[in-house]
Amino acid sequence: MSTQVSEQARAAVHELAGDCLQCFQCGQCRGACPNGFDLDQGPRRVVRLILSEDVEKLLACEDVWRCSECRACSDVCPMEVDVAGMMAAVRELQVTFGGVRCPERRAAAIATKRLSRKGSIDNMLFGTAMASRGFVPKDLLATAAMGYKMASGKVRRSPRLGAKDAVEPKPFYVGCALQQDKSALQATARVIRELGFPLAEMKGAGCCGHATRGKIAAKAESEETVLTACPACDHGLHESEIETVPVWEALVEHARREERKLSAKAPRFVPYVGCLSDRDTALASLAEAAELAGAEMVSSYPSLHAGCCGALGGMYRGASEAVHKLVVFAQEEAAPIVTPCLLCRDNVHSAGRKQGVHVYFWPEFFQVATAAETTADGEADD
Amino acid sequence: MSAAITNGVRPRILLCECAGTMASNLDFDWLEQVASEQGEVLRSSTWCSREGQARLLEMTETDDGRPLVFAGCSQDFAAQRFQRLYARGLQMEVADIREGCSWVHEAGGEAVTDKASRIIEAAVRFPGPHSNKLVLKRKVDSVLVIGGGVSGTQAAAELAQMGHTVELVERRPFLGGRAARIGTVFPTNDCGQCLPTTDAQAGVRKCFHRNVAIDNPNLRIWRRTEVESVSGKPGNFEVSLRQLPNIVTQDCVNCGACEPVCPAESAESGGKAIFTEFYDGRVQRTVDLEACTFCGACAEVCPMDAIDFSQSPELTTVPAGAILTAVGCEPAPARLIEHLGYGQENVVTQTEMSELMDDWEEASWLGQQPAKEVVMIQCAGSRDRRRLPYCSRICCMIALKHAIRLRTLFPEMKVTICYLELRVAGVGYENWYLAARRAGVEFLRGTPPRVQFDDEGKPVIEVEDVTAAEKKILRPDLVVLSTGMVPVPDTARIAEVLGAELDEDGFIAILDRKNRATETSAEGVFICGSAAGPKALVECNTEASAVASEIHNFLASAGRRTPPASVVDPAKCVGCDTCQAACPFGAISLIERSAAAPRPTEVRDDGKLAVIDEEACRACGICAANCPELAITHNLDDQLLFGRLRTMTEGVERPVVGFYCKECAGAAISLSGLRHDRYPENVRLVELPCLGRVSALHIVEAARLGAAGVFLAGCAEDRCQYRKGDLSAEEQVELARELLEEAEMKLPLELWHLCAVDRHTVGRRIRLFCARAEGNEEAHMAGLALERTGNPPCEGGEGCVHTGV
C-alpha cells in the first residue's frame, strides 16, 4: 500500500472513529449478532479497531464480510452506535484500499461485477463457481457438490404462481434462489394456488442486490409492499427502500382468515429461522402454521433462532457451528428441521446429510390440507 | 454622578508606598502632586503597619463624611490586611496601583507612574457602591423535611437536636424508607434501619423504633402526608399539607386480631388491607385506604377500640424558614428491563433477590440448593441511551454482596456476574471485590443484549465474553437483574411546588456539583440523599448531617449582605421580557403598569412593566447589560463605567482594554500580580461584579477610545458565579463584533474563561494578546521560541522581537 493510500485510509478511519467515540465495549453487539459464534473478532472488536485507528488490522479484517446486515447489533447498542454501518464502512474501505482477500469479499466482488452486466444472478451456480475457485474452505467441498446437484435441476421458466381471478394481486418478488430451485418453487406455487391467495410475480424484476453487500441497488421497483420468499431479498429490497413482507407470514394469515387448515409432512418439527429473517415474527409465523396444521413445534433448542446456517447472509459456505448443534438436536428429537429461508435450507441440509436429518423449506413441509389429503404428503425431499 | 468630588467634599487619598516595593517604576512625589488635584493625599510608607492602621481607625471612627480612597495593593490584598478595620466599619475605595500596575510592569519610565495616577483618579471620581443591604433578615425558625427515609429522618433528628422546629412529612404510614425494607446493606453487611443517636442514648446508632432522637419534642412527624403547595419567600415559607387519616389510633397494641377478619387484599402490604410494618414502631398498624372496603369488621374485633373510621383527610398550613427535600429514589420500572426477560418466572431484580435470600437461607440449612446456576446482569436498563443513560452507582456493590452470600450459602452454586465495568469505588469496597473473587464468583466482562427462554422456560443468555473475545451461551436457573434507580414518581411535582429545577435525568438538580451539593436552585430549599441521584447509605447519612448544618447556618445567620439591587426606570421600560429571561435568579417579574406609572412615549396602553425583587436580586448586572432600552440601572451604572474607561485610557495612544469579573478572573489576575508577572503598561483593566455586566456598548466605547484590542475575562467555563454571566457576555461580544464591523473598526476581541489556577498563565496570555493587538504576534512567538531554546536572551535594540515579552 502506498503512503498516500494509507494516509487516505487513515483519514477515513479517523472520521469513522468520530461516530463511535461513545462506545464502551459492552459486547452487546456480538451478543445480539446471529453470526456471533462464527466470527473471529466480532463487531465490538471492529469498533475498537476503528477507535484505535488501527488501519492495517481493519483492512485485514475478514469479519466485516461475514456480516449479514441484519442490523441486530445497531438495534441493541445501548450507546446508539450504528455498528452495522461501521461494518459496512469498513467493507467499503477494504474495497477502496485493498487489504484482505477473504472468500466472502471475493464473492461479493464477483457478484457485483456480474450484476453490473446482467440483471440477475444464478445463486446455485454462483456458489458452486466460488467453491471451484477455492473461495470456499476445502473441507466444505461437499457443500459445493450440493450446489452442483441442485443447480442441474434448476428451472429458468417461472410457473404461474397466483390465482387467475384475483381482483388485486399483490406483487411477489421471487428472487434468485427460489427461481432456481425446482422443488421449492413448485411447492411454493402449490400453496399459493390452493389457498387462492392473490399474488402476481413482479415482471422484469432482477437481483435484490444483497449478494453484492450493498454495492448494487435492487433491480426492481415498486410503490407497493412486496411479498418475498427469501429473507435476503427482504434486506436487499429494504436497502432500495421497498417495503416487504415475508410471503409465509401473509399465507398463514390468509389461511387463518379463510379458516383453511394446513397439512404438515411430519407430526413434529424443529424450526430454524437463520440470521436474516426477523426472528420473532418468523418464529411466530412458523408456530401459527404449526397450529393450523396440528403439528408440534419443538423449540427447546435454545440458540436455534440465533445461529447462522453458514451462508453468512448470502454465500454458500458450509455449515456453521450452530447448525451442527442444531442437527444433532434434531437427530435426538427425531424431527425434521423446517426453515423459511432457502439459503438456510441448503446449508443446514448439507450439514445434516450424514445424520440423515431432513431439512424442509417452509412450503415443502406445510401444504394446504384438502379433504382427501392426509398429513403425510408425498415423499420426503432429498 | 456619585463622584465624590462633585459633591464638594474633598476625599482623602491614602497613598501607600508599600515599603518601597514600587519604587522601581513609580515616582511617588509626582504621584502625590497629581493626586492632590483629586483630594487630600496622605502618604505613608506602609498604611498596613501598626501605626498606619491606628491612623486609619481614627479616621473611620471620627467619620466626617469624607470618602476614603486607598491607593496601594489590590482589593483582595487590602481586604486581608485591613480585615479588622473593615469589621469596625471601614469603607474605602481601593485603587490597585501595586498588583494592577507597578508590580506587573517594567522598571523605569514615566508611563507606569502615569497609569497609576489614572487608576487613582478613576477610583476617586468614579467610586463603586459601598452600602450592602441585608436581606432575608427575618426567618422562621422551622424546617419542613419532605421524606421520612434514612436521609430525611436523620437530617430532621439532627435539626431538632440543634433546637429548630422540624416538620417531618412522610408519604407512607411508616418512617424508614427503602433502606429499612431491604435486607442487609453494604458496606457493613448489616441492616439499614438504624440512625445515629442523641446524647440521651449512649452508643453510636439505634434502630428507628428504638431511637429517641426521632422522639425529640421539636420534631413533629406527619405520616401519610403530602405537600400540596408552597408560598412565601426563602426564610418565610407557608406550606400547605394534606394528611390522610391512619384509621388505627395510638391505642393499638399490635395484637393482630384485626388482620384475620379483614376481607380486603392490599397491594401495598402484600397481605390484608389492615397491616403493620414494624420499622419505626411509633405507629403500630395502618389501613390501606385504597383497598379497604370500610366494612368495619376489624373495628368489631379490636380489643382496644383502636380503630376509628370517622377520621377524614386534613389540610394544614405550617410555616417553614427552610425546606429540605429528601424524597429518595426507587428501582427502575419493569418496562426498562423487559428486554432482559423481566416478568418471566426465572428473572428477578436484586431487590427481589434480597427478599428471596431469607427463604434460600432456610433451604441451605436443609441441605437444598434452589438453583444450580445464577447469572447476575449488571447495568440492567442503565447506561443505555434509550433507557436510563446514567450509572446508579450502587448496583455493583449490591451484586457483590448478594453473590458472596450465595456462594457462602451454596458452595456448589455457580454464580456469574456479567458486568460492563465494576464501579466499586468507596472506602473498603475493593475488598468486597476481592472477597467475591475468593468466594468463587465468576466475573464475565460483557453484558447481554437480551435474555431468551427455552421451551421449559429456562433462561438462555447469549453474551460476548469481552476479555476472551468470544460469544458464549449461559443457561442459568435464575437471572438476577441489577437495575438502576429512578426518581420517585412524585419528584417532578414536588420540584415544581418548591420552585426547584430538575436535572437531565429527572432527579432534583443540586445547585453546584462541587460546592453546593445540598442546595437546590431555589433559595431556602435544600436537598439530601437519593432525591438528587442514586446514593449508597453511607453517602445518605453523610449528606443528612451536612444538610442539617447547612440549614442551621441558613436559619441562624443574620441574613445575606448584598450590594444594592438593580433598578428599572418605568419611564424607559417598554415591558418586553428580555430582562426577565436573562435574570439567572428569577428576580424580575413583569407586572401590569398602573395608570399613574410613568412610561416611555411610544408605550400607549398600560401594558407591562418590569420590576426587580430587591431580595432575590444579586446585582450581577446581566439585566442592565441586556436591556434594549437601557432602562435598568445597576449599582455600577453606565456613567460610572464609561467614566472609569475614559479616565483609565486617557493619555495612552493604543490602550489594550480588559474587562474582568471580580470573581474567578479577578482571583487569577490579582494572584498573577502577586507573582510580578509582567505585561505592557498600555493594558488598562476594568473590574466588574460579573462579566455579565458588560454590554456591547462598553466594548464599542473602548474601541472608540482607541483601544488596540479588548479582552473579557470571566469565570471558568460553565462556572459563572452568577450562573449565566459568561453566556450573556458571549452574546454581547458577538453583538459588539457586528457593530464594530459596521463601523469598519477592526480589533482583536476575545473572551477568556479564567480561574485561580490560571495565575501562572494569565500574564503570558495578556502579553500574547498585546502582541496580537499590535500586529506583531509572529515576532512575539519567535521571541518565545528563542527563549525556550536556551539561547541567550535578546539584548534589545534595533530589530528586537521581544517587545512586551
Image (cartoon, coloured by chain):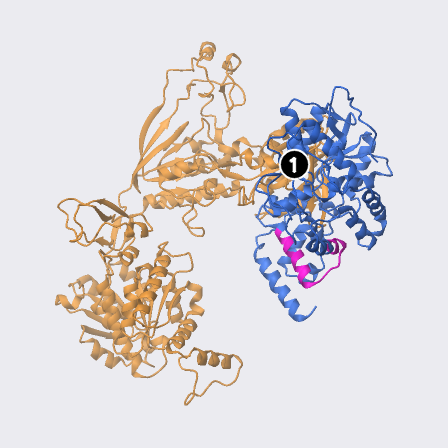
* The stretch drawn in magenta includes residue A98: yes
Q: Is residue B95 visible?
A: no
For disc 1, the chain is A
Image coordinates of residue A111 in percent, x first then y, are 72, 53
* The stretch drawn in magenta includes residue A33: no
Q: Is residue A222 left or right of residue A306?
A: left
Residue B651 position (above or below residue A334): below
Q: Is residue A151 left or right of residue A314?
A: right
The hue used for chain B is: orange
Residue annotated with mark 1: A200
- The residue sitting at the top extreme is B300
Quadrant containing the C terminus of chain B is bottom left
At 85% from the left edge and 39% from the top edge, which residue is drawn? A353
Image coordinates of residue B504 in percent, x first then y, are 46, 45
Quadrant containing the N terminus of chain B is bottom left
Image coordinates of residue B187 in percent, x first then y, are 58, 41
Q: How many marks?
A: 1
> Observer-nearest residue: B655 or A336?
A336
Image: magenta residue range: A85-107
> Observer-nearest residue: B217 or B492?
B492
Residue B252: which quarter of the image? top left
Q: Is residue B52 visible?
A: yes
Chain drawn blue, letter?
Answer: A
| Dot 1 amino acid type | Ala
